[in-house]
Image (cartoon, rainbow, N blue to C red):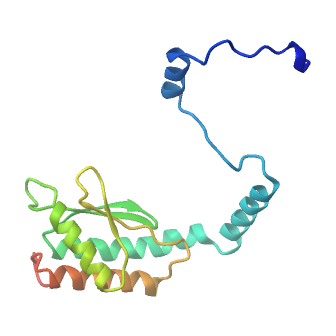
């Protein structure tokens, strides 16, 4: 169709068009089709394969989850360990029976972790889940450092042990 045969809309799209985007989802990309972004994307995929980052996420993530589950067994504040690989989350609760969200305790713990050199942020509707998103290249020593600092912070804040070990 030649440019002269195209007609411009006489008015902006109405509510019906906007609602269709809301129902069907929408896509936005400021880099779509750029040769540079394509090269960057392929380079990332090469690194994922060449450095076995998916395998590392499974191995180190499994180790980290085991460490987090051990903390959950020791501290009443930890209500549940969620997630898999290197995307775990700790749900923090005021009481283990009713599972009331520990919003204040979570904020306190995040501040203490920052004092110990670890950045962790709360997430969730009640801001009571620790968002743990390390890089895919995380090694076991760094995962242990994180778990050790979390253990120390929980102990220093007096969040109550279930049993000593």
Task: Locate the N terminus by quadrant.
Answer: top right
Judged left or right of residue 40, residue 102 is left
Judged left or right of residue 137, residue 148 is left
Corner quadrant of residue 151 = bottom left
Corner quadrant of residue 17 = top right
Asked if residue 86 is positioned above or below residue 7 in the image, the reply reads: below
Across and down, in percent, residue 9 comes to 69, 15
The total of numbered circles placed on residues is: 0
List the single residue furthest toward the front: 10
Q: Nearer the viewer, residue 20 or 44?
A: 20
Asked if residue 155 is positioned above or below residue 68 in the image, the reply reads: below
Q: Do we see residue 70 in this rendering?
A: no
Across and down, in percent, residue 73 comes to 19, 72
Q: Residue at x 38, y 68 (%)?
A: 132
Task: Locate the C terminus by quadrant.
Answer: bottom left
Q: Do we see residue 137 in this rendering?
A: yes
Across and down, in percent, residue 119 comes to 37, 75
Q: Residue at x 66, y 75 (%)?
A: 51
Judged left or right of residue 5, residue 54 is left
Q: Residue at x 25, y 57 (%)?
A: 127
List the single residue furthest toward the right: 2
Across and down, in percent, residue 60 comes to 47, 75
Corner quadrant of residue 69 = bottom left
Q: Residue at x 38, y 64 (%)?
A: 88
């Amino acid at each position: 169709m030649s440019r002269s045969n195209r007609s411009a809309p006489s008015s902006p799209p109405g509510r019906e068009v906007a609602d269709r985007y809301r129902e069907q989802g929408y896509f936005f990309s400021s880099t779509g089709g750029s040769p540079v972004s394509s090269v960057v994307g392929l380079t990332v995929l090469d690194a994922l394969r060449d450095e076995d980052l998916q395998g590392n996420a499974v191995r180190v993530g499994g180790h980290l989850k085991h460490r987090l589950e051990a903390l959950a067994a020791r501290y009443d504040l930890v209500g549940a360990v969620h997630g898999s690989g290197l995307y775990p989350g700790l749900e923090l609760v005021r009481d283990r029976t009713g599972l009331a969200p520990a919003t204040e305790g979570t904020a306190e713990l995040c501040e203490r972790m920052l004092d110990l050199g670890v950045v962790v942020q709360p997430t969730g509707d009640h801001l009571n889940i620790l968002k743990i998103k390390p890089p895919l290249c995380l090694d076991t020593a760094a995962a242990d450092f994180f778990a050790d600092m979390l253990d120390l912070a929980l102990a220093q804040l007096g969040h109550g042990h279930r049993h000593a070990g």
